[in-house]
Image: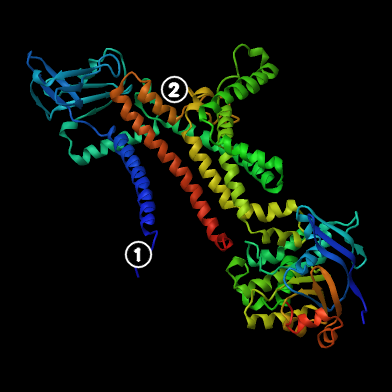
């Protein structure tokens, strides 16, 4: 069922100090599909995301073992450049975090880091990214105004545009619906399908309906362990594990 | 609904705030009135005394028993005060034909035009000086006196001092003070920002120690910094420079003497704690999500700092600058050890290359206050002058701060939504 694997973890473990957060996670995320990570709060979903682009490096006394392969790259190899890895594995956080810059400069931020200086090229790529998230028409007249003046839903799409502007292979989204109202959430899910044409998407959510609606594959995590991983249809209709069934039918806890 | 518990406390807090603000306003008002009062042109009074003689001059002090009169200063400025007991006075009047001849060294000579011409009054002066102007103060109406008043204020602001700082203006002191504070700002901001960044980025046991050390530094009396500046900069660094580069001029010191550079370095040391504390607080207030967002886009920590965190912390940088300016402009005690002088022959900035002369000694408004109030030979002239200097110093600090605050306000507008 997996044509291409965009990201593979092998026996990935993560510790924060003495506390082990992830246990032996082995997961292959298929390319150009939407994979949902579901599980109860505190099961390690967000920590897993932060492992995959090594944002956990920024947290003092965090430690990992096991391997992460992004395409052909070993994420923890000595010759892997962290900032290059992070560019290839974009992340959108739970809460929209636009920079206190103009709308244009928010999207251009990552592009400038890549060394793109030509105004025309920046403008083109900013426009393309904003169009990809269906924000262009709403902000075209005020690209130079502060991104902080946008609504939450617009901010969420802006940070997605910012993430995809640098053309990552993989786009990870950490509970992107939690700050949005139901209508914005639905629009956002449509957007995810659009984005999946060009990017591998990893979606963390604790909304079962959302996972069922949006994703092609689903991974269920519980207490830092991968309980079950498979095609979303199969996992939701015919779970192999008792824990999974309890969780998706709402009997968890 | 009944009164909620705690209402009384709110009134107490509001009362404390109002008291503080009230005292502050009184202080500024008092400074302004006492300072500006020195420039108001006084009437010329003629007194007939019991012994048959007559005195002509300005009343500078009076109480129930005595009147003090400033009479013609024939010889030197500030020596012609006469204390006259009220019982000796037969009559006093303010003749309309009284004239005041103001000399360019600040001396005043008084006369009556009906009996003595201005030229003859002028000729009374035993020590030669140029006549600046002849005033008919008693004949002037309020508007004309106002004009004279503003002339005096203008001269105070825009001319150099004369006659041992008792007369003339404070322009050099004003310029020197501003140059000193600006030079200090240029030194302290990079130093303070770099320290704050280091403390913010490196969170370990040693930085906790450094942080508490810096907070302690903020509480050290400013004169201690003066001693430090004298030993470290003037004698230490300056002495070494002289030995290495100006050995042929020794024992005449070139850099091993108080000067603008050493003074601004001393002030920078004095103010670095306030900059560090406010910049670090500003950096800490930036939501962690911004930092993560930047790193997640592939920025290095340095890029994140320069492109995102420091720009977002700009209001905090300016707060630090405001506090530093406020502390530096008022620190006179350390300046007395590292180069402030009563009367500097030259300005530290001029048209000669390299335009800024950091080794020159300088004047200072704050020192001007001390000098006029305590070190002057003429308290009657000196004290109002001290008030005027104090009011001007406050105005300078307010002006410098106001420009920083306006700048910060503009940045806040831009970043206001950051403060969620």
Among the 4 quarters of the image, the one containing residue A6: bottom right
Considering depth in this image, is B193 or B164 the residue closer to the camera? Answer: B193
The residue marked by circle 2 belongs to what chain? B
Where is residue B311 shown, x and y percent of the image? 63, 54
Q: Name the residue under label 2.
A: B342
Considering depth in this image, is B210 or B311 the residue closer to the camera? Answer: B210
Residue A247 to residue A59: above or below? below
Look at 80% across and 83% down and name the residue there.
A245
Residue B146 visible in the displayed image: yes
Where is residue A236 shown, x and y percent of the image? 81, 85
Residue B379 to residue A181: above or below? above
Q: Tell me the colour scheme of the image.
A: rainbow
Considering depth in this image, is B310 or B20 the residue closer to the camera? Answer: B20
Q: How far apart are marks 1 and 2 (CA)?
A: 61 Å
Residue A193 visible in the displayed image: no
Q: Name the residue under label 1.
A: B3
Q: Residue furthest bottom?
A: A237
Considering depth in this image, is B167 or B184 the residue closer to the camera? Answer: B184
* Camera-nearest label, 1 or 2: 1
Q: Is residue A100 left or right of residue A196?
A: left
Where is residue B275 shown, x and y percent of the image? 58, 42
Q: In this view, does B243 lie to the left or right of B413?
A: right
Q: Is residue A116 left or right of residue A66?
A: left
On-image quarter of the N terminus of chain B? bottom left
Look at 85% across and 86% down and name the residue there.
A234
Q: Dot 2 lies on which element? A: loop
């Amino acid at each position: 069922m997996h044509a291409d694997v965009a990201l593979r973890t092998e026996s990935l473990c993560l510790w924060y100090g003495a506390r082990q957060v992830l246990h032996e996670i082995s997961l292959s995320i298929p390319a150009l599909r939407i994979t949902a990570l579901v599980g109860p709060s505190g099961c390690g979903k967000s920590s897993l995301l932060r492992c995959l682009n090594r944002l956990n490096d920024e947290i003092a006394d965090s430690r990992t073992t096991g391997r992460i392969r992004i395409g052909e790259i070993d994420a923890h190899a000595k010759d892997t450049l962290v900032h290059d890895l992070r560019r290839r594995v974009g992340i959108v956080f739970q809460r929209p975090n636009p920079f206190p810059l103009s709308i244009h400069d928010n999207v251009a931020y990552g592009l400038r880091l890549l060394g793109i200086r030509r105004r025309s090229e920046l403008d083109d790529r900013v426009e393309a990214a904003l169009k990809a998230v269906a924000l262009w028409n709403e902000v075209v007249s005020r690209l130079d105004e502060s991104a902080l003046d946008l609504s939450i839903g617009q901010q969420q799409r802006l940070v997605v545009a910012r993430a995809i502007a640098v053309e990552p292979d993989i786009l990870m989204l950490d509970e992107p619906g939690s700050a949005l109202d139901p209508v914005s959430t639905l629009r956002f899910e449509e957007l995810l399908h659009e984005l999946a044409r060009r990017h591998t998407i990893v979606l963390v959510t604790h909304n079962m309906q959302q996972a069922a609606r949006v994703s092609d594959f689903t991974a269920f995590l519980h207490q830092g362990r991968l309980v079950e991983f498979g095609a979303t249809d199969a996992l939701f209709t015919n779970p192999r594990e008792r824990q999974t069934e309890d969780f998706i039918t709402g009997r968890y806890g | 609904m009944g009164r909620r518990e705690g209402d009384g406390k709110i009134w107490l807090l509001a009362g404390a705030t109002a008291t503080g603000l009230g005292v502050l306003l009184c202080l500024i008002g008092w400074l302004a009135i006492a300072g500006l009062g020195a420039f108001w042109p006084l009437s010329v009074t003629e007194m007939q005394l019991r012994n048959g003689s007559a005195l002509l001059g300005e009343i500078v002090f009076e109480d129930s028993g005595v009147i003090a009169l400033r009479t013609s200063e024939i010889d030197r400025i500030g020596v012609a005060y006469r204390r006259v007991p009220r019982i000796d006075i037969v009559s006093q009047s303010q003749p309309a034909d009284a004239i005041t001849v103001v000399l360019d060294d600040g001396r005043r000579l008084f006369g009556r035009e009906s009996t003595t011409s201005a030229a003859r009054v002028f000729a009374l002066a035993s020590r030669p000086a140029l006549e600046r102007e002849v005033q008919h103060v008693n004949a002037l109406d309020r508007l004309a006196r106002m004009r004279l008043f503003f002339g005096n204020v203008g001269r105070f602001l825009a001319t150099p001092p004369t006659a041992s700082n008792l007369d003339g203006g404070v322009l050099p002191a004003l310029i020197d003070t501003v140059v000193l504070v600006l030079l200090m700002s240029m030194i302290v901001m990079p130093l303070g920002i770099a320290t704050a960044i280091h403390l913010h980025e490196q969170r370990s046991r040693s930085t906790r120690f450094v942080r508490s050390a810096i907070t302690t530094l903020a509480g050290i009396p400013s004169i201690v910094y003066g001693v430090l500046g004298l030993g470290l900069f003037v004698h230490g660094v300056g002495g070494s420079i002289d030995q290495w580069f100006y050995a042929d001029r020794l024992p005449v010191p070139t850099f091993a003497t108080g000067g603008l550079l050493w003074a601004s370095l001393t002030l920078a040391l004095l103010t670095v704690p306030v900059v560090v504390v406010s910049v670090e607080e500003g950096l800490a207030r930036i939501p962690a999500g911004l930092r993560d967002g930047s790193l997640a886009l592939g920025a290095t920590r340095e890029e994140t700092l320069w492109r995102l965190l420091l720009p977002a912390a700009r209001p905090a940088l300016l707060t630090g600058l405001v506090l530093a300016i406020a502390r530096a402009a008022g620190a006179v005690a350390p300046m007395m050890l590292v180069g402030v002088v009563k009367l500097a022959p030259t300005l530290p900035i001029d048209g000669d290359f390299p335009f800024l002369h950091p080794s020159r000694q300088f004047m200072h408004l704050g020192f001007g206050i001390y000098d006029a109030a305590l070190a002057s030979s003429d308290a009657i002239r000196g004290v109002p002058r001290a008030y005027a200097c104090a009011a001007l110093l406050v105005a300078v600090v307010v002006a410098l701060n106001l420009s920083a605050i306006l700048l910060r306000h503009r940045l806040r507008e831009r970043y206001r939504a950051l403060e969620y």
